Amino acid sequence: MAAAGSGKTEVVSQRVASLLAEGADPASIVAFTFTEKAATELKERIRERVTAKVGESATNQLGKLFVGTIHAYCFRLLQSHVPTYETYTPLDANQLVNLLYREATRLGLKRFDNAGKLFRGVAAFQKSVDVVENELLHIDQLAAGDFKDALVKYYEMLDSYRFMSFGTQIVRAIDALKDANVHAKVTADLRHLIVDEYQDVNPAQEQLIELLAKPKGNADLVVVGDDDQAIYQWRGSNVNNIVAFAERYDGVTQFHLLVNRRSRPGIVDLANAFAQTIPGRLPKEMGTHRIADGPAVSINVGLDDETAEAHMVAQDIEQLHANGVPYRDIAVLVRGKVAYVKLLDAMEASGIPVQPGGRTGLFAQPEAAVFGATYAWIADIDWSPGRFITRARITIDDLVDSYARVFGLGGLILGTIREHLTQWKARTGEKDFNVNLVGDFYVLAGLLRLSEWDLADERQRNRLGTIARFTNVLADYETVTRRSRRDANAPTEQVGGAIGDEWFYRNFALLLVNYATGNYDDFDGEDDLRADGVALGTVHGSKGLEWPVVFLPSLTKARFPSNKVGTPQNWLVDPGLFDAARYEGSDADERRLFYVAMTRARDWVSLSSHERVTTRRTAPSPYLVECNRLIQSVGLPKSAIATGFDLPDLAITYSDLAAYATCPQSYLLRRELGFMPPIKAELGYGNAVHHVMRVLAEHTQTVGKLPSPREINDLLTSDFFLPFANKAAHKEMREKARRLVFKYVADHKEDLLRTWATERPFELYLPGVVVSGRADVIYDEHDGVQDNLAIIDYKTSTGGNIEPLQLQVYAGAGRREGLTVGAAFIHDMDSTTRHSVSVDDAAVAAAEAKVLITAESLKQRDFMPLPEIKKCRSCDFHKVCGAAKLN
């Protein structure tokens, strides 16, 4: 049991370091975190503690340690132990809605809304699918009817497209673990399972944990959590998992970390008193560690209106900053995003910098709004950038005026834009118009002269981030709509997706106005830890974070607790099969959320409310009223201890490091700002060939002999999948792959028989940087010597360019693990040529020096372009890059 601020991350990292010091194999340890950000922090902390306890050389083994989310673990498990899933693509929430919209007619989703509204039907279906997956309900448990029929088709549809949702990843992993052979392989070496934020796991995740831990698995289980901080019941989490843990597992030993080392005594005292009002909690009380130093809590009840409250917050922030508190050490946390508007206005008026963070809707930004209007105009759909704004028909004059205003254009360029838009709209009705939604957008971006924008100007860079975010909307729709699927009538073939007609644009425009405008957030900001700005976010998003100073405004009766809590919802799943009330929320859930909000503060927390939003009066939150009775309100803090600033070590994949080295400005546009690449029909060919080669190598390793020609043909027939190729292109590229694979097997059969590992992960630990990657295949007995390894990297086409750095990095990482790496080769599948890569000590040392220089440049955020004509012509982003050399 780890109370807020008790140092659980430190305890977990010390636990792992102790296990390694006692001789545990890093591969025997798995640690689950709630977010990827928490995983990054924990892994860095583990490395620091291992270095201190065991020595720096021990960190070279940490690549075998898994620290990450449950979803990431499940997806890795499936791709490692059920090869079919290697060709699957995970979908995020927005992409899943795009897919359900595409398949809505086949699934009959309109019927799930009483008024027959399509997008409401999609939402109702998706919400109930989440319940089925979170609760691990079997389809046979569902009553016969429309929902069950649609659900069966839904899972068949996901497999035909080779997609997986977040929930499906966990369900399929559990199904895989029910296979005795898979379970034995997964659990064979797993001896220690650590679960952070255990109070937030749902029943499906708990089932996964049970399958990995003793007695069903081989792992000792350590869970870390606090029932007072269970805040995700609306996503299926069940606080009873931690409350009743000792009743479900044998031999449980409980440790209490109840000393709050984060917050000053005044904050701890208030949190302790408020926690007593949470029903059904485990009895405990936080102790204090820090000494009091002036005021720690301020309470302001009933400021005149929301604007006045926001200005009070801004004034206090200005005063704190004048007193020496950096902006980055201040957070403003709210229950819901509706409170953002007034706060952002007040901070902008006061000149207070705010960290980017996707706090406003994307289409509230003028750039995204004019782009959305453009696609609505092309499709002859009435447009509105927001739910509460009346839809209206857009004219070409409206569009041109908007482009002039938003992008500061005039003169001849507006005539060019008018002509381009008019021709574009006319072409969408042509049968032979081959749509490339993202690529066509970059043509428009070129006309808007985005390449002339100054990337050194923070405001213009953020505007480019908004535009890049819009390319995500385009890509989500296009990725799903153009996705190929297995042909139900000819399972050995695949059918291409939609590639363009007027309905392609019409459906996209309908998706924009009915879904995207309310669900896509603005640019989330660059990953620059040096930026000095106030953090503005929701309480849910603050989980696991802390700041010296925290403001909790808008604590009104209508907002905290949320006025939606406890409202009965329309479920398509029989309520008798799950606890619907848990998903709908309760006062106890909101009290836990309020407790989490208060305990984010280290030195000082401000709680406040307002009496009016407009003219209508609103009462203060009952939680604020209770706090006002529990503690005496005081003023600004006497002091706030700055967190200081140290650049963390850079954790990066080799592919990202290589992308940065190729052109830092292209990396900025793609990885930092988020511009999406256009879709190409041949996309995925290399991955498809890699998958076939991996399965062949694993088959040979397992059975000790080469696969027969028939087995190879069967594998190519069943597993060769190209996500965006039509039937003809798929056949053509599969035949090309068949020739390459058979040629490889004929020329290198002895290599296959010496397979040591496939998709072997490596992590190279150097001062200030960790580079991760996976080797395609490793062969043993190089030059006839046992345990002398050769690393092979498959390339479907090198284009005559042989880049040795990747294999030199893997060779260096392998040697630091204690492996003997005697050789490395790049195998060009297209030309059937194998190129030797030097991996002697001097070459590896030079490669590591290059990695250090490149990583340091990236850490310092040096995005200087490296333009070359050939490179720039093939770059997906040259139309928005001012440095591009095309001639």
Image (spheres, rainbow, N blue to C red):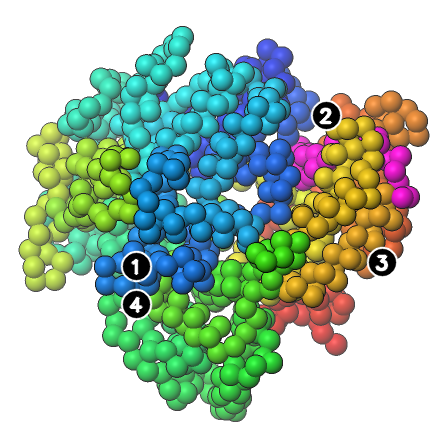
Image quarter in which the C terminus is found? bottom right
Badge 2: few (under 14), some or many (20 or more) residues near its Cα, within 10 Å?
many
Q: Are marks 2 and 1 in contact (CB under 8 Å)?
A: no
- Judged from the image, the secondary structure of the residue bearing numbered disc 1 is helix
Q: Which residue is painted at 70% across and 55% down in the image? A: 685
Q: Which residue is painted at 84% across and 48% down in the image? A: 742
Q: Image quarter for residue 52?
A: top right
What's the CA distance linking mark 3 and mark 2?
32 Å
First in sequence, mark 2 or 1: give its number. Answer: 1
Q: Which residue is mark 1?
A: 111
First in sequence, mark 3 or 4: give its number. Answer: 4
First in sequence, mark 1 or 4: give its number. Answer: 1
Q: Which residue is mark 4?
A: 386
Magenta segment = 746-774
- Judged from the image, the secondary structure of the residue bearing numbered disc 4 is loop
Residue 679 at x, y percent in the picture: 61, 64
Residue 654 at x, y percent in the picture: 68, 44
First in sequence, mark 4 or 2: give its number. Answer: 4
Identify the disc placed on residue 151: none
What's the CA distance linking mark 1 and mark 4?
25 Å
What's the CA distance linking mark 3 and mark 1?
56 Å
Q: Which residue is painted at 22% across and 47% down in the image? A: 569
What's the CA distance linking mark 2 and mark 1?
57 Å
The amino acid type of the residue labelled 2 equals Glu
> Residue 751 lies in magenta, yes or no?
yes
